[in-house]
Image: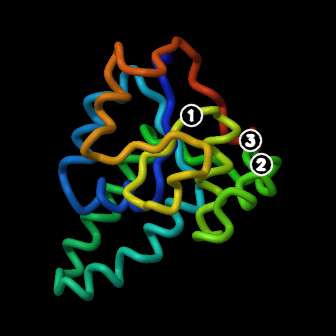
Amino acid sequence: MEVGRSIVLDANILMRAVLGKKVRQIISEHAGHVAFYTPQVAYDDVRRHLPTVFTKRGWTDDQLAMAFAVLDTLEPVVHAVEDKFYESKRSAALARIEKRDPDDWPILATALVLDCPVWTEDNDFFGTGVATWTTDRVEIYLADDGPGARTDRLIEVRSAT
């Protein structure tokens, strides 16, 4: 797959893709020319938190099952990155984000390895030295002629097992 650019999704963006339409629509519209990545831990976080979110909102078990199905459909498009891929940037990522939210280091480390921005609604990434895009502006970056346009090959982020 030829891609024009890459971006790392924060777990909150994955959650928004599951719960709403806008993020999922943006991903779908740009999947042909953008490589979307997120650490596997972000998928794990969303899977862990979805039942609590659904309980708080009073949604049904059937709705929860549909949400998990939506999350599963994202995996071929939003590539899960194994920790071995970004572990080398752990110290650098923690130095930049530890005081704000050390649990976000895998997202930042992935962006550092891939040399690309983070798509997030989380202010903790601001000032870390990595470009951040929020949902209301990310399409500027994702556009074929947007900032950072380049032609790369999809990077293999899973180890061959």
- What residue does disc 1 label? 116
Q: Earlier in the sequence, mark 1 or mark 2?
A: 2
| Image quarter of residue 121 | bottom left
Instruction: Give the side of residue 26 with respect to residue 51, left or right.
Output: left
Q: How many marks?
A: 3
Callout 2, which amino acid? Answer: Lys
Q: Position of residue 66 (x, y in %)?
A: 25, 64
Q: Residue visible at 30% across and 53% down?
A: 17
Q: Position of residue 78 (x, y in %)?
A: 45, 42
- What residue does disc 3 label? 159
Q: Position of residue 134 (x, y in %)?
A: 34, 47
Label 1 vs label 3: CA separation? Answer: 21 Å
Vertical relation: 59 (above or below) 11: below
Is residue 80 or residue 111 the one in the foreground?
111
- What residue does disc 2 label? 89
Q: Residue visible at 48% across and 21% down?
A: 148
Label 1 vs label 2: CA separation? Answer: 14 Å
Which mark is nearer the camera, 3 or 2? 2
Vertical relation: 4 (above or below) 134: above
Residue 64 — which label? none
